[in-house]
Structure formats: structure tokens, C-alpha cells
Image: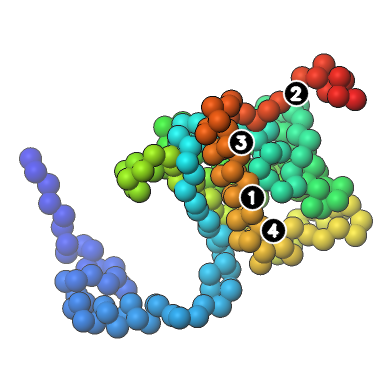
Amino acid sequence: MEQIVDFKKIKEIPGLLRIETNPKDEIQGVLLDYTHSVYKHEEIYGKYCTIQDYVDCPPEKAYEYLKNTYSLEEWTFSVRDFKKTNTEGLYVGKDKIGDRTKIYCKTIANPEAMTVDYHCAWDQGQKLWMIYLMRIIPAEPVLNRPGCVVLWTNCHHPFYDKNPEPGLAPPGRPWIGEFWDMFYAGHWIELQNLKRILEYRHKNKLPIGPNLLTKEDQNEDC
């Protein structure tokens, strides 16, 4: 049997703006109230930081690259030297923007949705609260062109405002939350790094990477 929506129940919810209860000319006024020529930084970046860009690389290749935790060493500005820990799926590396700071990371990826989420934290690996949410979207249906669109969102966790484990911090190091106002700009730099790496390797028919060295390779470079 075909189903229809019962609009009687939804009318009970206060505050909804729907054409049945708010005429179009009234909604136009609401839209104008929500649209400003100037926005405060806090209004845009206060609770969430979202960036996105087109990448001329097949979405499947972009996903395969991003789901590899070691790729962060190539396209991020300062995360380096990942090593596996004794906890399955958990890596520890260095965030060189924080001098002697350890960063822990667990990558959670979904091949069907092409989402890659980096669950991270400075100093400790028990509570991974710095979460970088990324989604790869095929560009063909949304932009009518080959390649993909990468979306990246961070949410302002309360720990950005106060270090939950101050005793683990290296002496004199600033806290990651002090940089929140610069997250958009910093992440934009990193997204452009990601875009350039993927496009360069795809265009030149190179392995997408990341480029990993074996212990033997490292010894040869020493």
C-alpha cells in the first residue's frame, strides 16, 4: 500500500518554517535576516570548521590514499613519524607544530560511503577527541566533470578550550585550542597540499601512495 506523510503530527513541533504555515513573502524576510554582507569570524568558525575543494583525481584513488594513516605525513603541514602502537589500529607520531608533541591517531574508513575519519589527540591515546571528518564525493554527478570533491569538517570539542591532561604536555607548549581561529586557514593550506599530491600523481600515472620506505631503505638513506 502506498504511504503518505501525516502532516498533523509535524504541526505539533514548534518553530518549524514550512510553506503551509509561513507564506513565501514572509520567508523572504527571514532569509534576508540570515544573510549578511559581513560576518564575524566567530559566526562562521566558532563551533565548526568546514572546507572543501575539487580534486582532479578519481574518487576511488583519493579514498585509497586518505585511508592510509601514513598519508598524513605527506599532505599535513606538521604531522610526521607515525609508528604503530600495541593497540590495534592506533598510531603515534609527532606533531611538529607543537614542538615535542606526540599525536595519536586511529583512522576509521568506510569504502561504501567513501568517508575517512581521523580520530586523534595530542599527548595521549586513550580518548581520541580531535576528530577530522572527511568525505570523498564523485565529481561527475555534482559538478559534471571527472574527479572528486573532498569535504573536511572539524567540530569544536570542549577540550579545545581546556587541555584535559595538562600534566602530559611538554613544558611551555601552547595548547592546540589556541590555534582554533586559524584552523580554516591552516586546513586550507593542507587541503591544497592534498589536492596537489593527488593531481600530480594521477596526471603522471604514478602510484597514489603514500610513498613508504622499508627499514632497509631507511638504512640506505642514512
Q: Is residue 39 left or right of residue 81?
A: left
Q: Which residue is mark 1?
A: 190
Mark with earlier residue (3, 1): 3
Residue 161 visible in image = yes
Residue 173 vs 124, above or below: the answer is below
Q: Residues within 10 Å of mark 4 (few under 14, many from 20)?
A: some
Q: Position of residue 139 (x, y in %)?
A: 39, 43
Of marks 4 and 3, the one in the foreground? 3
Q: Which residue is mark 2?
A: 213
Q: Which residue is mark 3?
A: 107
Q: Residue at x 12, y 47 (%)?
A: 3
Residue 69 vs 40, above or below: the answer is above
Residue 128 visible in image = no
Q: Which residue is mark 4?
A: 159
Of marks 4 and 2, the one in the foreground? 2
Q: Which mark is residue 169?
A: none
Residue that sits furthest to the front in the current view: 204
- In three-dimensional space, the C-alpha distance between marks 3 and 1, rounded to whole angstroms, equals 18 Å
Q: Residue at x 71, y 48 (%)?
A: 77
State the SS at label 4. Answer: helix
Mark with earlier residue (4, 2): 4
Amino acid identity at mark 2:
Leu
- The foreground one among 11 and 144 is 144
